[in-house]
Image: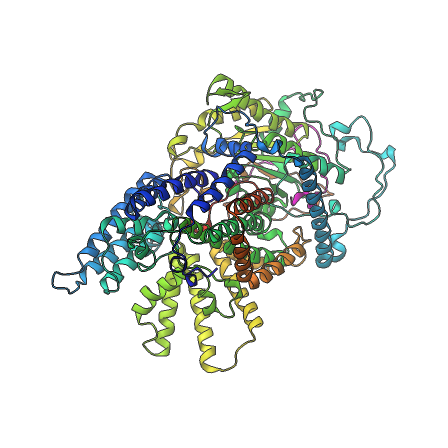
């Protein structure tokens, strides 16, 4: 079931009544039990085997976390090491086996003629990358003594909480688990924000991302040879915005769902295309993943505790692994490497020169760099990348796409991004002043308008595939 | 929004969940009341539920002024389309200059009307002399390479007609359509690879199966035959739920906009489900179901035949998803039977032998020469990996060959590696099965982009 599908909306609204009634009648524990049951049912709607895998994974992680603390108050290390190894092995088998199998066979074939590794027909469980990272974060936090081990029901809910299960945000234990464990009664104190975020998600995902994909990104990426160089540039920019609208639209809707359940999720996006340099970009794009990579890859590798050269090496390794996390493909690895090398160049500049680019120039250069990275992100293989790059030299074709219209849309997007926070704050304030039926009417009108404006169909969220 | 900076729980301990729930519930109820039919079609198509329900009475009909709103919406859409068309032309002129302008057309004397090149529908009379000798920058006269995944919904047909006045009248549903005689020579020519020549146009029709294959096919056809392709495939569609998306009407509308020499159809993943017809439940595979589905297949083939185009119907692949297991043979039987009724125009190409080790069951990994075992189907048991898509593009490409060279034609570019393995060389065949193909109309980019 899709978060923005009509069936999910109707079932969720019914569930909300039950959930809040249980809260007032039986308290927070009952609400947690309901949430746990709903989360597993929700996951079963994709495939019951996914739920089986998740419960196995969760039990292993939670039991190992329980084993960390000794009776005398010290902490064991082996459960953390074992837990991280099991989590990564689990992810590796389901997500990366076939990638490594084909690569390993390619390497082995010159040495061992006819070498063949067994084929495993595995299905990638949706959300596995996200709950694996959340599980590791929990285990390491307990191992470091930053957080105490959770009870079984709370821990299971922490790793299966349905708003964040499929594509994050990747929560630290002190963000989500702390709210699950809190004995105080849950409350919705800002319903206008939930309504506003649902409207924002509909605009971003159902309308803008779908429109950009259908009109620009899909045609241009599927057949780059037939388009003028400027159309390819336009298609790449359109894909950049499509990706942002898609994933931040997803984040908006799950944040709204969590708010309606009385939870507060961490922020995942802060207008990334307004970033003035690459490190700024990574503080604004998929923030919960960036900080996970920083906390659990970059810092354990040594972070900036060594010399300058070692710090840069750690950075490149962390970014490359981040790329690999996105998908078992060499193009994702190179995408991570691209950003890693970009960050090294930026750091080198900052080391040798005090001079900084004006903010606007920095924004433009960062956006171009990020867009070129998205080309690797989108491409299925090297042939697609080279065909697209080759198309940048094609200036003789008569354009068939409305590139002036896209240019106008880009100007609008960048302008709105600058004022997005203020617009949201003011809209929330205005919505708050309305009675409940007025808020309802606003949601209805927006939903109807978006249904009319959006292209037909309900495309899936891009990040569900990661 | 910086939620982490807003201590919701700390500032206001009093929960507003009753009003929040009331607001959201009311919005949902009203949305279902207004959009009931659209939701029903969506659920029927995607989850195959509520099939027994016919059309729902919708509250939208009761809302005062809904007609006025519909008119406003139409006006707004028209206004938007006009702006987009102007911007497109301006963009073309800015980038391509004179090349974006059409070549002036010479006014032909009526007596010089070439009979052989006249489409069947306009055969009785010669077309009126062209009056568009002025080099205007109308979008309908500009050249468009390829527009992928465009939307040619049947509802846009009327508006499209008002723009493109040079198209031939529609002959679909024309009772006067007579199947040409299938002489042995004509049949032999029809069974040979389809001859393509520079400038031919190909229409790609289908669901998400075609959406995966189309990009590879478009590139390969462009490189090998210098032909243009129009991909109008759309995910979640098929022939079982025309209320959700009507492919026969869409293909008809596409032909009314432009001429195509070849149509390639690849669908079926959303089709092996029960139907409802006038409120009656029709089981998948029943006699009535076959009859209705066959008629829809036939409509597409007939539209193609009436426009003297060739059609390649790619068979549905073996499915690995539990609820689709073993269902595609019936669909393929219908596609093959209906294609066989129009032997001069349509051909059925089974995809199973190329995608399966035993030629009929779902196979995720295939042993390919030089590549070893590769994954050709995705985890969902329906769609294809890039390798699978390339295999199907190769299979389709093998149905074509170059038209016999003509002195008036530009030289054919050499065969290139298009990302798919090139098709095996086939003997040259007659370019047209029965009648000469009418000259291709120039596409209208402004319309095509919708």
The C terminus of chain B lies in quadrant: top right
- Magenta stretch holds residue A283: no
Q: In this view of the protein, which residue sits in the foreground, B376 or A139?
A: A139
In the rendered image, is residue B136 in sight? yes
Q: State whether residue B180 is above or below residue B25.
A: above
- Magenta stretch holds residue B448: yes
Q: What secondary structure is the magenta-colored segment mainly?
A: loop
Residue sticking out furthest to the top? B287
Q: State whether residue A48 is above or below residue B345.
A: below
Residue sticking out furthest to the left? A72
Residue at 52% x, 70% y is A276
Residue at 59% x, 51% y is A216
List x then y, in percent, for residue A406: 63, 55
List x then y, in percent, for residue B194: 60, 34
List x then y, in percent, for residue B204: 58, 38
Position of A415 with respect to A201 (left or right) is right
Quadrant assignment, res B165: top right
Q: State whether residue B117 is above or below residue B1.
A: above
Position of A57 with respect to B385 (left or right) is left
Q: In this view of the protein, which residue sits in the foreground, B385 or B70?
A: B70
Quadrant assignment, res B320: top left
Q: Give the range drawn in magenta.
A: B422-450
List x then y, in percent, for residue B428: 61, 36
Q: In this view of the protein, which residue sits in the foreground, A122 or B81?
A: B81
Query: How many numbered marks appear?
Result: 0
Residue at 82% x, 44% y is B105
Position of B397 with respect to A316 (left or right) is right
Colour mode of the rendering? rainbow
């Amino acid at each position: 079931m899709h978060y923005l599908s009509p069936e999910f909306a109707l079932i969720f609204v019914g569930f909300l009544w039950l959930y809040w009634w249980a809260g007032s009648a039986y308290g927070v524990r009952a609400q947690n039990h309901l949430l746990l049951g709903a989360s597993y049912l929700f996951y079963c709607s994709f495939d019951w085997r996914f739920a089986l895998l998740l419960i196995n994974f969760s039990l292993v992680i939670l039991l190992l976390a329980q084993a960390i603390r000794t009776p005398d108050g010290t902490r064991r290390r082996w459960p953390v090491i074992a837990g991280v190894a099991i989590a990564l092995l689990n992810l590796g088998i389901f997500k990366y086996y076939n990638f490594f199998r084909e690569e390993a066979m390619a390497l082995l074939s010159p040495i061992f003629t006819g070498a063949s590794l067994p084929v495993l027909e595995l299905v990638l469980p949706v959300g596995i990358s996200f709950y694996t990272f959340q599980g590791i974060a929990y285990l390491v936090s307990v191992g470091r003594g930053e957080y105490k081990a959770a009870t079984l029901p709370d821990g299971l809910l922490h790793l299966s909480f349905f708003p964040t299960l499929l594509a994050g945000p990747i929560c630290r234990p002190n963000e989500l688990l702390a709210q699950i464990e809190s004995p105080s009664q849950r409350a919705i104190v800002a319903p206008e924000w939930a309504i506003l975020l649902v409207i924002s998600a509909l605009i971003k995902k159902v309308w803008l991302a779908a429109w950009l994909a259908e009109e620009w990104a899909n045609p241009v990426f599927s057949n780059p040879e037939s388009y003028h160089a400027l159309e390819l540039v336009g298609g790449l920019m359109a894909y950049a915005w499509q990706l942002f609208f898609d994933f931040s639209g997803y984040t908006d809707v799950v944040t709204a769902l969590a708010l309606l359940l009385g939870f507060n999720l961490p922020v995942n996006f802060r207008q990334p295309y307004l970033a003035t340099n690459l490190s700024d970009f990574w503080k604004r794009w998929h923030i919960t993943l960036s900080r996970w990579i920083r906390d659990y890859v970059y810092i354990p590798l040594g972070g900036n505790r060594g010399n300058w050269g070692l710090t840069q090496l750690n950075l490149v390794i962390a970014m490359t692994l981040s790329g690999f996390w996105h998908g078992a493909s060499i193009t994702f690895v190179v995408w991570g490497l691209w950003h890693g090398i970009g960050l090294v160049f930026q750091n080198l500049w900052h080391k040798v020169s005090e001079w900084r680019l004006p903010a606007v120039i920095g924004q433009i250069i960062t956006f171009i760099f990020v867009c070129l990275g998205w080309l690797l992100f989108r491409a299925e293989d090297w042939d697609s990348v080279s065909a697209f790059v080759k198309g940048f030299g094609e200036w003789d074709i008569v354009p068939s796409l409305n590139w002036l219209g896209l240019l106008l849309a880009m100007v609008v997007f960048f302008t709105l991004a600058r004022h997005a926070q203020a617009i949201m704050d003011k809209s929330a304030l205005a919505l708050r002043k309305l009675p409940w039926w007025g808020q309802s009417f606003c949601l209805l009108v927006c939903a109807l308008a978006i249904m009319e404006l959006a292209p037909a169909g309900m495309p899936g969220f891009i990040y569900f595939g990661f | 929004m910086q939620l982490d900076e807003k201590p919701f729980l700390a500032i206001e301990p009093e929960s507003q969940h009753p009003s929040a729930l009331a607001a959201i519930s009311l919005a949902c109820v009203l949305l279902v009341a207004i959009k009931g039919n659209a939701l029903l079609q969506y659920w029927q198509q995607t989850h195959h539920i509520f099939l027994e329900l016919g059309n729902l009475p919708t509250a939208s009909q009761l809302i005062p002024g809904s007609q006025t709103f519909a008119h406003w919406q139409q006006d707004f859409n028209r206004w938007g389309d006009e702006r987009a068309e102007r911007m497109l032309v301006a963009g073309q002129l800015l980038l391509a200059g004179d090349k974006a302008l059409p070549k002036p057309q010479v006014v032909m004397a009526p007596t010089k009307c070439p009979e052989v090149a006249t489409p069947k529908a306009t055969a009785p009379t010669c077309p009126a002399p062209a009056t568009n000798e002025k080099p205007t920058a109308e979008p309908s006269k500009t050249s468009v390479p390829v527009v992928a995944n465009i939307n040619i919904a049947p509802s846009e047909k009327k508006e499209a007609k008002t723009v493109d006045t040079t198209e031939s009248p529609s002959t679909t549903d024309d009772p006067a359509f007579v199947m040409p005689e299938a002489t042995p020579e004509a049949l032999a020519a029809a069974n040979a690879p389809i001859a393509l020549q520079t400038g031919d146009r190909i229409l790609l029709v289908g669901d998400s199966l075609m959406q995966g294959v189309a990009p590879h096919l478009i590139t390969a056809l462009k490189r090998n035959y210098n032909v243009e392709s129009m991909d109008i495939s759309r995910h979640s569609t098929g022939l079982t739920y025309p209320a959700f998306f009507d492919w026969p009407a869409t293909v008809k509308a596409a032909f009314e906009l432009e001429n195509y020499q070849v149509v390639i159809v690849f669908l079926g993943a959303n089709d092996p489900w029960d139907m409802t017809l006038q409120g009656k439940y029709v089981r998948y595979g029943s006699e009535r179901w076959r009859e209705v589905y066959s008629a829809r297949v036939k409509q597409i083939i007939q539209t193609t035949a009436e426009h003297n185009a060739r059609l390649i119907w790619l068979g549905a692949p073996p499915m690995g998803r539990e609820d689709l297991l073993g269902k595609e043979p019936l669909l393929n039987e219908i596609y093959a039977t209906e294609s066989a009724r129009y032997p001069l125009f349509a051909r059925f190409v089974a995809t199973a032998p190329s995608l399966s080790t035993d030629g009929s069951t779902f196979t995720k990994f295939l042993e390919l020469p030089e590549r070893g075992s590769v994954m050709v189907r995705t985890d969902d048991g329906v769609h294809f990996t890039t390798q699978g898509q390339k295999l199907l593009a190769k299979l389709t490409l093998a149905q074509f060959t170059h038209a016999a060279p003509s002195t008036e034609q530009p030289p054919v570019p050499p065969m290139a590696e298009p990302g798919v393995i090139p098709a095996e060389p086939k003997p040259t065949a007659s370019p047209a099965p029965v009648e000469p193909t009418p000259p291709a109309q120039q596409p209208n980019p402004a319309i095509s982009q919708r």
